[in-house]
Image (cartoon, grey):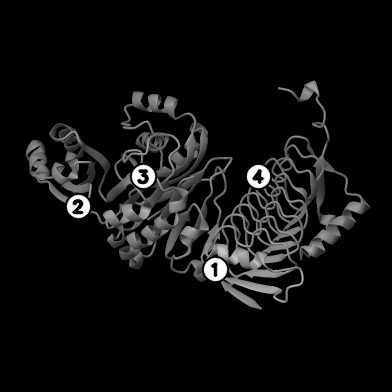
Amino acid sequence: MCGIVGLFLKDKALEPQLGNLLTDMLITMTDRGPDSAGIAIYGSETTDHAKLTIQSDEADTAFDGLAKALGDTIDAPVSLAQKDTHAVLDLPADKVAEARAALREINSSIRVMSTGDTLEIYKEVGLPKDVAARFEISGMSGSHGIGHTRMATESAVTTMGAHPFNTGSDQCLVHNGSLSNHNSLRRKLRREGVHIETENDTEVAAAYLTWKMRTGSTLGEALESSLDDLDGFFTFVVGTKDGFGVVRDPIACKPAVMAETDQYVAFGSEYRALVNLPGIETARVWEPEPATVYFWNH
Amino acid sequence: MQIFDLEAEGLRALNSTLHAQAEHTNQTVWEIVNPKGSHAIAVGLDAPIEVNVKGSTGYYCAGMNKQATINVHGSAGPGVAENMMSGTVVIDGDASQYAGATGHGGTLVIKGNASSRCGISMKGIDIVVHGNVGHMSAFMAQSGNLVVCGNAGDALGDSIYEARLFVRGSVKSLGADCIEKEMRPEHLKILADLLERGGCDAKPEEFKRYGSARQLYNFNIDNAY
């Protein structure tokens, strides 16, 4: 089944509560997907700096001395903040590609969860409440975020198979459904030079949107063309640095509910996920139409 | 009136309490508070009681209903009143996918819009929608009536057998074997009754009728691909 949640804040006063609200929404969706959980938070931006969220199954040792080793290799200041199996590296924005390559050399157990100016992604195997607690998501602030509870259908239950998937700077995607043409599309995207790490169908969808936006499409246009090029069942919720988008396939088997107030736009696989949001009683609540793109920008 | 707090007492207690109401119970009116989008609220009821759900529901509310009158004072999630046998279900807001699916009898009234596959495989239920219905509504419908006061989405009545479909607004497209049909006096009479039962003030003359062309009933090589 899978459960998806998303929250795009219009009211800055709510930003300190973003992690808390999203965590509550995510835990409510546990019975749609107890295999793994993940959450993407768009936090504050630091000028000329980028964030690299990394993960290691050997986090007890893998992050010791890593900031210095990486800084020496790329010849730039690097700082590291560890949270359980993940760590966020802060480094100059123009050094991201170099740092990714260097990380593979320094410690092959390290996997990159996300890159971007504001985006951080935390995901692990396990129940949503445990995953959210391990990464202290409820204490995080930010402008928008998306989350996912996974019931695996297309690839293994692993950290790398968990959503959200990040395939371009500050871009991420969560998915409920399954794609039938992901293998051929993955080959095509790889030929185009798009970096895809897993055999998961959702990563292909994320990479497809990244490729479209890299070749000149807006988020809205990329989502429009996904309706022609992606085959299968899908409800997608996507995030960009300042945007938030939703699209469902033309058959629209996978559930979706949206709510909008003056303070926020929210998405849930079910209405249950939205019931504790402030002002939900008077929000405009609707079901997104099939094959229709919805997106918002800050 | 009996008040039941779903959040405090839980779903199993709710449904077993409602199932325990005998044919001649004195507790004829129930109010369910704090539904908060929960699934399977008031399913499988079989007593002439009235249940008022104060808020929105999740999947399968009022499924398999017999005799009871269930009012949802909010919106309903997927599969509301699925496989209803008799009684009445009224949704104040919108209904999600496959509302009234496979319903054998009774009346389902949706005062907002219904989503895709409304009345899929309906088998005798009457469904009155004040707003619009989504794509593939009345797919494989076998018996009963679907009244749409707004517009219908793509592929209305795809592979329909025998149900009557009445639509006041536009129809985006008709599904396989579904055609517009003549509105005869007996249909206007049936529709007037349905509109009255559904609490609609629309006039029967404003509607068009759709139904089966009956071309898919028997094997015909022209139907093969």
The CA distance from mark 3 to mark 1 is 33 Å
- Mark 1 or mark 2, whichever is nearer to me: 1
- The CA span between labels 2 and 3 is 25 Å
Are the residues tagged 2 and 3 within 8 Å (C-beta)?
A: no
Mark 4 and mark 3 in contact? Answer it, CB < 8 Å. Answer: no
Tell which subunit mark 4 falls on. Answer: B
The residue sitting at 49% across, 52% down in the picture is: A269
SS at mark 1? helix
Front-lying residue, B40 or B150: B40
Question: Would you name the residue on which mark 3 appears?
Answer: A164
Camera-side mark, 4 or 3: 3
Position of A286 compared to A106: left or right? Answer: right
Q: Which mark is residue A47?
A: 2
Relative to residue A221, is residue B174 drawn left or right? right
Residue A237 appears at what percent x and percent y?
Answer: 44, 47
- Helix, strand or loop for disc 2: loop
The 10 Å Cα crowd at callout 1, few under 14, some 14 to 19, many 20 or more, is: many
The image quadrant of residue A62 is top left
**Sequence-earlier tag: 4 or 1:** 1
> Could you give the CA–CA distance between mark 4 and mark 3, rounded to whole angstroms?
30 Å
Which dot, 3 or 1, sits closer to the camera?
1
Q: Do discs 4 and 1 belong to a common subunit? A: yes
Secondary structure of residue under mark 4 = loop
Mark 1 touches mark 2? (CB < 8 Å): no
In space, the residues marked 1 and 2 are separated at their CA atoms by 50 Å
Read off the residue under disc 1. Answer: B6
* Label 3 Cα crowd, 10 Å radius (few <14 / some 14-19 / many 20+): many
The amino acid sitting under disc 3 is Pro
Discs 4 and 3 carry the same chain letter: no
Amino acid beneath label 2: Thr
How far separated are the C-alphas under marks 2 and 4? Answer: 48 Å
Asked if residue B66 lies left or right of residue B17, the reply is right
